[in-house]
Amino acid sequence: MGRLFGTDGVRGVANADLTAEMALGLSVAAAHVLAEAGTFEGHRPKAVVGRDPRASGEFLEAAVVAGLASAGVDVLRVGVLPTPAVAYLTGALGADLGVMLSASHNAMPDNGIKFFARGGHKLADELEDRIEKVYEEHRTGAPWDRPTGTGVGRVRDYDEGFDQYVSHLIGVLPNRLDGLKIVLDEAHGAASRVSPEAFARAGAEIVTIGAEPDGLNINDGCGSTHLDQLKAAVVAHGAHLGIAHDGDADRCLAVDHTGEEVDGDQILAVLALAMRERSALRSGTVVATVMSNLGFKLAMEREGIHLVQTAVGDRYVLEEMKDKDFALGGEQSGHVIILDHATTGDGTLTGLLLAARVAQTGRTLRDLAAVMERLPQVLVNVPDVDKSRVQTSADLAAAIAEAERELGETGRVLLRPSGTEPLVRVMVEAADIDQARSVAGRLADAVKSALG
């Protein structure tokens, strides 16, 4: 698998890349590394462990729990809950460590392990590197120092976590959702119980689809990566809006009453205005990535909201928010972070706040989302080129400058080397789709010529 830890934990095909032995070993390594770092000093360590409904999560959960307990960590097993719920409970219960077993929006055969530090925050990169190093050392034969007797960890189910998390979500809402009819697509995933319960308690009339997980059907033709079923259901049921989550419910996309998609950029725009109205948008700023639609940037400028842009990836959005104490950030894909109430993207919370804005204003989601106009966006992948020369090629720089002159203020060009493949991604936005395609095609040719 190369380096084990990626941008969102350790992920791979369960029982092939990600085995029970690896899950156990990484958990023991995490316990030892955090102990060495002083995290457990002066008290008996405690961890929260949760998972999404994948069949492989059952044996991986058992391995993680066994590893932690064998290293002297008491374990609260919260069962099937969203990633943001595990992060929240890690903080709320004063745990030293949180572990979530999920591969998010990936297909069922995949799974992953994500560790949270005390407070429910992502582990620092240096700690992940240390965990990986310690895991490799012991995988090749170095013996562990194992506690015995009363030193071993105790394990118990913590069923109260479900209600505790739902109550937290309801407590965040600025107003109730009475009078709204909402279709929820749960992707047969981790929010299949939590999300309907939260929306119902908030007063909405709900219709659920994709809410019958059997361990095999997660993300299968449903959820935030497959919106067709939700679009049809919203129109068929005459609902005010629809909300879609992914497998671990850390993201949210929406559908308006006509069946049109409302993406992460539009959700951010709606929430930014709502939070500013409540004086909750600190520094009048929202954080997004460089892949956000130009229409979002233009809308924020028009509304007097400052936009800070980061590299692609919700981890970079979160880092910027924490560093500068901003309250709202996210990605076009639907990862939305409301830092006052969550330490990671929370799809259920995002959906609830979006619905609350509809209820509070009496306006349709279509009308609210019209605060920004999504400009046509064309993405072309150019393979088999020297991506390391994107920033240094004079010929490519000249082609980019020419494209930017043609597009003017209503267009944008972004060239980005892939982080995992030998290719360059060319993204062009323009007021006209034909112009965007034309410029993207010429730039793709320029990339092949300059870097091929």
Image (cartoon, grey):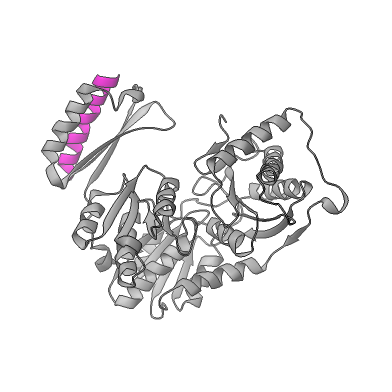
Q: Which quarter of the picture shows residue 89?
A: bottom right
Left or right: residue 248 compared with residue 258: right
Is 443 or 294 nearer to us in this picture?
A: 294
Q: Which residue corresponds to the image point at 70% horizontal and 47% vertical from the top-left?
A: 64
Asked whether residue 435 is drawn in magenta, I would say yes
Q: Position of residue 196 (x, y in %)?
A: 51, 69
Considering every residue shown, the one lying at the far right of the view is 149
Q: What type of secondary structure mainly makes up the magenta span?
A: helix
Q: Is residue 406 above or below residue 207?
A: above
Above or below 171: residue 113? above
Relative depth, front residue between 432 and 43 = 43
Q: Position of residue 324 (x, y in %)?
A: 39, 53
In-image side of 19 versus 446 (left or right): right
Q: Is the C terminus in the top left, top right, bottom left or bottom right quadrant?
A: top left
User: Which residue occupies 11% across, 37% down?
Assistant: 406
Write the residue at 38% across / 55% down: 329
> In the image shown, does 188 or 200 lie closer to the viewer?
200
Q: Percent position (x, y) of residue 387?
A: 35, 25
Whether the magenta-drawn stretch holds residue 315 is answered as no
Please identify the quarter of the rendering in which residue 420 is found: top left
Q: Residue at x 20, y 54 (%)?
A: 298
Q: Is residue 442 visible?
A: no
Q: Is residue 436 positioned above or below 165 on the image? A: above
Which residues are drawn in magenta?
432-452
The percent position of residue 351, horizontal first and vertical second, equals 42, 65
Quadrant the N terminus occupies: top right
Q: Is residue 368 visible?
A: yes
